[in-house]
């Protein structure tokens, strides 16, 4: 469906500027991608509090850790592939082991990096980050949720990983929305099947549910922006109602939101769960729209898949 879309990355950059005006301890670091990550907005406003370490992601993380030790609140940005893949050891051993107050706001996650292809498409980043003790993992779905997640991260003490989409996204939430890291959002109640999603696939899931409704399938939609710690209460309540759960994510089906939901339900309320995402494979080059369709993540393909599963 055609909707006006906003740059989530620009919202991230603007929010950093707003936070920087209120809190002089906020500093921002980037690995030579400030135009892409939109941290350039903070750099223009506060050049003395912005640090471009160059194409050196391990140094990016350890420098942020050092700044955190002095009482600063570092926001660290680069592409998700390089933040979580190239610098995983530094995040684990330097940031998370010491529970340092570092915020990793990585952009360009998932297949929607598009034409840059498999080498730049982080399909494992959520899996990598949620496996590390002390790390919180957040995947916002639109500009408003991104803004509130960044504001929350600035106030919360401890390591946070926030995955920010490359693609422009339509608004799902308005200013009445309140981000709560302990609670998921039930976007729509239903009785036939539970759809759990986050990030870019939330709007596709909402559109998918409209198609399912026309086919007589009443879907419940849960937006799960915080993958760790997981809101098990909301999952359990919905699973007991529908007894069929489908997870939808722009990430590998291994280790991400789907795995987190399966792990929780298997121990508390064994339920039929279908994970929809990228199967055990690399991505490829193409437009974001083409790739979402190819991997079955747009509304039409999701509805077709889910109808078959429910029936």
Image (cartoon, rainbow, N blue to C red):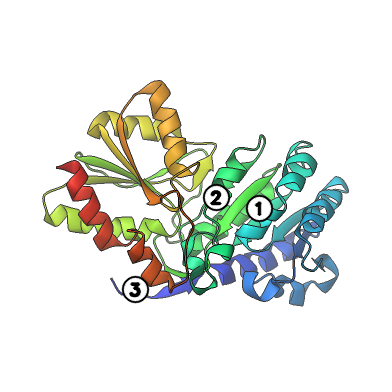
Task: Name the one closer to the observer, 119 or 228.
Answer: 119
Residue in the image at 32% along x and 58% along y = 296
Q: Mark 2 — residue? A: 124
Q: Mark 3 — residue? A: 3
Residue 190, picture quadrant? top left
* Labelled pair 1, 3 in contact (Cβ < 8 Å): no
Residue 273 in percent (x, y) is at: 32, 36
Q: Is residue 244 above or below residue 48?
A: above
Q: Is residue 212 visible from the viewing direction of this image?
A: yes
Q: CA distance from mark 1 to mark 2?
A: 8 Å
Q: Is residue 101 visible from the viewing direction of this image?
A: no
> Is the residue marked by circle 3 packed among few (<14), some (14-19), or many (20+) residues within 10 Å?
few
Task: Name the one closer to the observer, 39 or 278.
Answer: 278
Q: Mark 1 — residue? A: 85
Residue in the image at 55% along x and 44% along y = 127
* Labelled pair 1, 2 in contact (Cβ < 8 Å): yes
The C terminus - image quarter: top left
């Amino acid at each position: 469906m055609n909707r006006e879309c906003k740059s989530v990355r620009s919202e991230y950059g603007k929010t950093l500027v707003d936070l920087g005006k209120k809190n002089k301890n906020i500093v921002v670091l980037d690995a030579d991608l400030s135009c892409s990550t939109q941290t350039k907005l903070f750099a223009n406003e506060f050049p003395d509090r912005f640090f471009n370490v160059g194409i050196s992601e391990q140094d990016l993380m350890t420098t942020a850790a050092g700044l955190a030790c002095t009482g600063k609140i570092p926001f660290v940005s680069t592409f998700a592939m390089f933040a979580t893949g190239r610098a995983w050891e530094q995040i684990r051993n330097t940031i998370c082991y010491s529970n340092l107050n570092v915020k990793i706001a990585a952009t360009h996650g998932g297949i929607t990096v598009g034409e840059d292809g498999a080498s730049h498409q982080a399909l494992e980043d959520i899996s990598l980050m949620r496996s590390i003790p002390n790390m919180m993992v957040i995947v916002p779905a639109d500009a408003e949720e991104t803004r509130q997640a960044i504001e929350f991260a600035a106030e919360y003490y401890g390591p946070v990983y926030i995955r920010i989409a490359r693609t422009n996204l339509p608004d799902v939430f308005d200013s009445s929305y309140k981000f709560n890291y302990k609670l998921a959002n039930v976007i729509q109640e239903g009785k036939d099947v539970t759809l759990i999603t986050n990030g870019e696939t939330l709007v596709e899931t909402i559109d998918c549910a409209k198609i399912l409704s026309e086919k007589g399938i009443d879907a419940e939609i849960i937006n799960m922006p915080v993958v760790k710690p997981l809101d098990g209460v909301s999952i359990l309540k919905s699973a007991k109602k529908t007894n069929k759960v489908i997870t939808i994510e722009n990430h590998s089906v291994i280790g991400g939101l789907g795995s987190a939901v399966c792990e929780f339900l298997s121990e508390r309320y064994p339920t039929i769960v279908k994970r929809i995402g990228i199967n055990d494979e690399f991505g490829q080059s193409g437009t974001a729209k083409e790739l979402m369709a190819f991997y079955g993540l747009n509304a039409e393909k999701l509805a077709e898949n889910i109808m078959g599963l429910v029936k």
